[in-house]
């Protein structure tokens, strides 16, 4: 039988709580004080009577350490080496600098004090991670800042040719599957078709001017990342959703603005061709033309309705970012292999 029950007192826990219970059960003045403290503050907790007097004081915050002059200089140098992608022409929005900044003037609408996100802004937000991954590829940064050698430049133009030559066929393919009641989309596709004709020939001219074999490029098919990218868009438009084409447009026009504008001068300098236009017509023309297309594209995608159509555009854009990025990464790997073979 429990000892507390045998003595007529309630059973109590062991240890410190046992001593506290005996004190509270005593009839002395001290017991009364303890009972009042127990009811007011709760049961005594072990060790609190030994806590420092300043335990509950607000912590004192130390001032942040001042940066040494050398530290500030190092930080400034680090910022100066961060790649700065060019902005679009006035009136447009650079796709390189779109992250997190909505275009309230063109794409947003305030109603009842709240901001309504346009589909274009949602598209940018939901493809931001894929875009960041693309622009973190070392060869993309290197080409924009320091240019590339002749062989690597010809290899890039070769892959560009094998996707650009499919641009008009893809647009026609999309037009054939486009809903007949979406006149805005059909009209935009016709405008794109009119503007994009013959651009693949510019690339062949550039290749020939800098010493590449343009006819061999024409007869080829491109490497697997470009073939996979083009094949995916054909499939997506024909079997999934005709609005998928807009995902490819977002990626290729957006990246061409940044890469072409920043890269053309860097490549010229690397090849000792400063001031020359021949050999760079594709880069320079698309750096200018696609800036004009950005606002047009924004307005176009904001006319697209329906969650299914929106998801198709976003999914295609993320897929194309991955495959287009793999094309650049493979160019770099192939260039490294050539360098190792030449050194052997």
Image: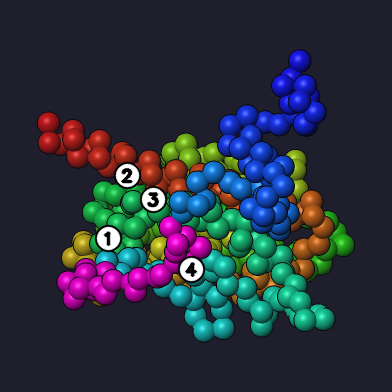
Query: Mark 3: which secondary structure?
Result: loop
Based on the displayed image, in which of its 4 quarters is residue 306 positioned?
A: bottom right
From the top left corner, tell me how far across and down residue 195 is, in percent: 59, 68
Image quarter (top left, top right, bottom left or bottom right) of the C terminus = top left
Magenta stretch: dominant SS? Answer: loop
C-alpha span from label 1 to label 4: 57 Å
Which residue is outermost to the right? 181
Tell me whether circle 2 and circle 3 mark residues in contact (CB < 8 Å): yes
Residue at the extreme left of the image, as rendered: 344
Report the mark closest to the observer, 2 or 3.
Answer: 3
The residue that disc 4 covers is 58
Q: Secondary structure at mark 4?
A: loop
Residue indicated by mark 2: 332
Q: Nearer the viewer, mark 1 or mark 4?
A: 4
**Which of the two labelled residues, at mark 4 and mark 3, occupies the earlier sequence position?**
4
Q: Nearer the viewer, residue 177 or 218?
A: 177
Residue 168 shows in this picture: no
Query: SS at mark 2?
Result: helix
Kindly tell me whether residue 49 is visible in this rendering: yes
Identify the residue shown where x is 69% and y is 44%.
26
Q: Is residue 36 left or right of residue 262?
A: right
- Give the total number of marks visible in the rendering: 4
State the CA–CA distance, disc 4 to disc 2.
57 Å
* Residue 137 disc label: 3
| In front of the other: 161 or 44 | 44
Question: Residue 123 at what x, y percent from top left?
Answer: 65, 60
Q: Residue at x 20, y 73 (%)?
A: 68
* Sequence-first disc among 2 and 3: 3
Residue 295: x %, y % from top left = 61, 75
Residue 73 circle label: none
Residue labelled with disc 1:
147
């Amino acid at each position: 039988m429990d000892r507390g029950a045998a003595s007529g007192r309630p059973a109590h826990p062991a240890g410190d709580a046992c001593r506290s219970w005996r004190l509270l059960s005593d009839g002395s003045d001290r017991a009364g004080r303890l009972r009042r403290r127990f009811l007011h503050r709760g049961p005594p907790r072990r060790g609190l009577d030994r806590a420092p007097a300043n335990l509950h004081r607000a912590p004192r915050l130390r001032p942040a350490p001042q940066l040494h002059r050398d530290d500030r200089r190092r930080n400034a140098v680090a910022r100066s080496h961060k790649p700065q992608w060019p902005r679009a022409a006035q009136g447009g929005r650079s796709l390189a600098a779109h992250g997190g900044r909505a275009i309230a003037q063109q794409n947003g609408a305030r109603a009842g004090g709240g901001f309504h996100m346009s589909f274009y802004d949602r598209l940018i937000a939901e493809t931001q991670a894929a875009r960041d991954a693309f622009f973190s590829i070392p060869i993309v940064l290197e080409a924009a800042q320091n240019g590339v050698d002749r062989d690597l430049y010809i290899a890039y133009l070769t892959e560009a040719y094998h996707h650009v030559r499919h641009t008009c066929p893809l647009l026609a393919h999309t037009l054939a599957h486009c809903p007949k009641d979406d006149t805005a989309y059909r009209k935009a596709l016709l405008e794109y078709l009119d503007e994009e004709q013959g651009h693949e020939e510019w690339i062949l001219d550039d290749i020939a001017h800098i010493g590449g074999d343009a006819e061999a490029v024409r007869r080829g098919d491109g490497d697997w990342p470009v073939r996979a990218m083009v094949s995916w868009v054909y499939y997506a438009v024909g079997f999934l959703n005709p609005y998928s084409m807009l995902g490819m447009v977002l990626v290729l026009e957006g990246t061409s603005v940044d890469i072409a504008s920043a890269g053309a001068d860097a490549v010229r300098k690397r090849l000792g061709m400063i001031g020359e236009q021949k050999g760079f017509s594709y880069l320079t023309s698309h750096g200018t033309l696609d800036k004009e297309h950005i606002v047009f594209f924004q307005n176009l995608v904001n006319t697209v309705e329906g969650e299914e159509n929106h998801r198709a555009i976003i999914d295609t854009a993320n897929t194309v970012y991955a495959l287009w990025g793999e094309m650049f990464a493979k160019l770099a790997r192939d260039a490294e292999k050539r360098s190792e073979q030449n050194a052997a």
